[in-house]
Amino acid sequence: MLETLISSKTRVKLLIRFFLNPDSRGYLRVLASEFGESTNGIRVELNRLEAAGLLRSNIGGNKKYFEANVSHPLFNDIRNIILKHIGFDKIIDKIVNNLGELRKVYITGSFAKGLDSNVIDLIFVGDDINKEYLVSLVEKTEKLIHRKIRYLVILEDEVKTFVEEKDKENILVLWEKR
């Protein structure tokens, strides 16, 4: 879907990288390595996104680091489009809202770093989650979004220890009970 609106595949990768996890940062050479693309192609798109105000940069040592501009008026809209492109909206609709005593859902792995992947790693936090029902929902959702979902179910009192082991670029809250 997103590729039909934005013709540059590099730009789509950069938007996913920075808007999926706004805490992530990156610089030219690492981004080129992550995406398997030339530094020149990445540089052109980074400059365009920075000129549009969607990304901001700062210098650290001899590197120019980029990150999402969370204060941009379109930040939330673009982030929602990215979440829909990946299929997270369907995950929430199909899984989260029908599981029982669910408290939080975290994304880990590639998507938490802002990298596109065929596998979505999720952590479900709650005390009384119907695991059989979860398995059937995961299977249905995988078919719907055409991605594999790996998941872990942990108790609410275990979450603090688990989250502390991850740095903020490797874990992202997808959903939280309010």
Image (cartoon, rainbow, N blue to C red):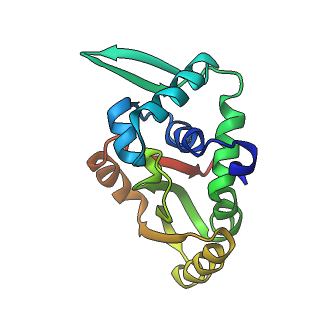
Q: Position of residue 48 (x, y in %)?
A: 59, 23
Q: What residue is rendered at 54% in x and 42% in y?
A: 10
Residue 177, relative to residue 7: is it above or below? below
Left or right of residue 170, residue 45 in this image: right
The residue lying toward the viewer, choosing from 117 and 104, is 117
The part of the image, by quadrant, that contains residue 29 is top left
Q: Nearer the viewer, residue 72 or 65?
A: 65
Q: Quadrant of the N terminus?
A: bottom right
Q: Is residue 171 visible?
A: no
Residue at screen point 69% across, 56% down: 89
Q: Is residue 147 above or below residue 4?
A: below
Q: Which residue lies at the image location 39% right of the left edge and 56% below the top edge?
A: 109
How many circles with numbers are drawn on the protein? 0
Rendering coords of residue 54 (x, y %): 60, 24
Does the image show residue 120?
yes
Q: Position of residue 137 (x, y in %)?
A: 63, 77
- State the image coordinates of residue 110 (x, y, percent, origin top left): 42, 54
Residue at image x 52%, y 80%?
Answer: 131
Is 34 positioned to the left or the right of 11 in the image? Answer: left
